[in-house]
């Protein structure tokens, strides 16, 4: 295998200059799920750490979340001008065309380059590398990158193994051309994939493989399927390996990392990776308790949540690591820049509070 391993060698680097997140207002708690599925709050919390998730209303799509996060991040970066819009998502509005052009148009950015990245839960880190490439190549001075997913639209609501894990949300950043040594410059990167394991996470129907067959797909094939136990093992191994490779390329030691910001797959996975790396759990940023696994949105949402709570401060050194279907994985380093603190994307889940007794809508 030849994973992509890159550092900020060019004179132009992509520098983070805006951050925002947004989740839909409908909250689904563990108690609510337990009313319609053979599960309970204790099982979900013990196995995943999740207490609640936010989900879209009927008719809401990924682009609606992406536009809201995009509107907020452009305000945070104090700009209405970018040269490219990149949307990382597993749940595009349509199989064709991509979601990014529609998002760009709704943000008043019609005319700029716009495309989607399909790397499942690693999409945001792949997106950071792509945005850095666009900037380094001189194609764009400023890039809007949005990670947005509505897993509730592809997970079978009757599938207790997956319905408990996923939530919907969007997180966004603006990257501008800058210098590799300034705070906010993204890189070094590590990106990798293993397509021999593609069947571990899959929506079997809807693509050309199924459409070239006669007949209608089964209910199971139309929905998201995951071999959870195997994915769990790969997630821990790949995330730890990718994190180590990135640190070593940059010449950082584990103790140089102030905050580890992993893709929020499952609290046990995040803690296992942190333990494996020798990082104290306090340095591991988690928000899976409050929003579940939000796919490509999970890292920017975790950043927005931590920055809103002033947990991440200018000068702090961050390691971002993701893992997802494909299989795909990736990591990236950056030193936190001075940014306006974003608004909290959601009410943080108080671990001592049962998080409500059922489905509700936040204001
Ligand atoms: O973001 C992309 C990457 N995704 C991930 O990283 C997810 C990785 N996987 C996981 O997080 C975990 O594998 C799960 C949370 C999905 C499942 O946890 P687990 O500890 O691996 O449980 P399991 O699948 O081995 O199931 C154990 C038992 C089974 O019953 P039996 O066969 O032992 O009788 C399941 O049927 O738990 C049962 N089970 C449930 N019980 C109550 C599965 N889901 C549930 C449920 N409530 N929701």
Image (cartoon, rainbow, N blue to C red):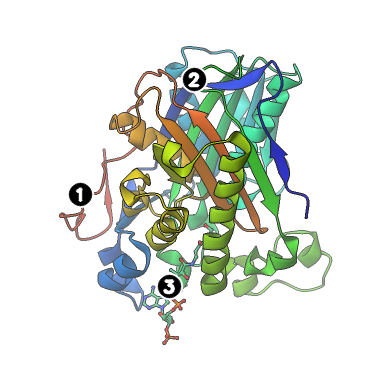
Residue 349 position, x and y percent, is: 25, 49
Nearer-the-camera pick, 281 or 309: 281
Q: Is residue 19 left or right of residue 230?
A: left
Does dot 2 land on a helix, a strand or a loop?
loop
Whether disc 3's CB lies below 8 Å from ligand 1 is answered yes
Which mark's residue is nearer the viewer, 2 or 3?
2
Q: Say which element carries label 1.
A: loop
Which quarter of the figure is the N terminus placed in? bottom right
Q: Quadrant of the C terminus?
A: top left
Q: Could you tell me if residue 158 is visible in this image? A: no
* Residue that label 1 marks: 350
> Which corner quadrant of the figure contains ligand 1?
bottom left
What residue did someone put label 3 on? 160
Of tags 1 and 3, which is closer to the observer?
Answer: 1
Q: Nearer the viewer, residue 314 or 308?
A: 314
Q: Nearer the viewer, residue 131 or 347?
A: 131
């Amino acid at each position: 295998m030849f994973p992509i391993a890159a550092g900020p060698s060019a004179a132009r680097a992509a520098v983070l200059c805006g951050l925002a997140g947004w989740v839909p207002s409908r909250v689904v708690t563990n108690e609510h799920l337990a009313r319609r599925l053979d599960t309970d709050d204790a099982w979900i919390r013990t196995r995943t750490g999740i207490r609640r998730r936010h989900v879209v209303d009927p008719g809401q799509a990924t682009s609606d979340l992406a536009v809201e996060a995009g509107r907020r991040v452009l305000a945070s970066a104090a700009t209405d001008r970018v040269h490219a819009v990149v949307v990382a998502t597993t749940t595009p509005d349509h199989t064709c065309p991509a979601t990014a052009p529609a998002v760009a148009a709704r943000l008043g950015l019609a005319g700029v380059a716009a495309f989607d990245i399909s790397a499942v839960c690693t999409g945001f880190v792949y997106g950071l590398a792509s945005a850095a490439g666009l900037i380094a190549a001189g194609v764009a001075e400023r890039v809007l990158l949005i990670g947005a997913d509505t897993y509730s639209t592809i997970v079978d609501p009757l599938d207790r193994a997956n319905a408990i894990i996923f939530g919907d949300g969007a997180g966004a950043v603006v990257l501008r051309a800058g210098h590799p040594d300034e705070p906010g410059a993204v890189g070094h990167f590590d990106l990798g994939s293993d397509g021999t394991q593609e069947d571990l996470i899959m929506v079997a129907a809807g693509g050309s493989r199924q459409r070239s067959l006669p007949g209608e797909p089964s209910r199971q094939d139309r929905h998201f399927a995951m071999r959870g136990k195997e994915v769990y093992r790969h997630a821990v191994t790949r995330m730890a390996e990718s994190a180590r490779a990135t640190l070593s390329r940059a010449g950082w030691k584990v103790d140089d990392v102030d905050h580890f910001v992993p893709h929020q797959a499952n609290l046990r996975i995040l803690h296992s990776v942190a333990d494996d790396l020798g990082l104290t759990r306090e340095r591991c940023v988690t928000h899976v308790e409050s929003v579940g696994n939000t796919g490509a949105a999970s890292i920017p949402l975790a950043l927005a949540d931590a920055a809103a709570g002033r947990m991440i401060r200018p000068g702090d050194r961050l390691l971002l690591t993701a893992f997802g279907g494909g299989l795909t994985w990736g990591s990236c380093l950056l030193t936190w820049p001075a940014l306006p603190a974003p608004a909290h994307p959601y009410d943080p889940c108080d671990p001592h509070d049962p998080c409500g007794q059922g489905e509700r809508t936040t204001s």
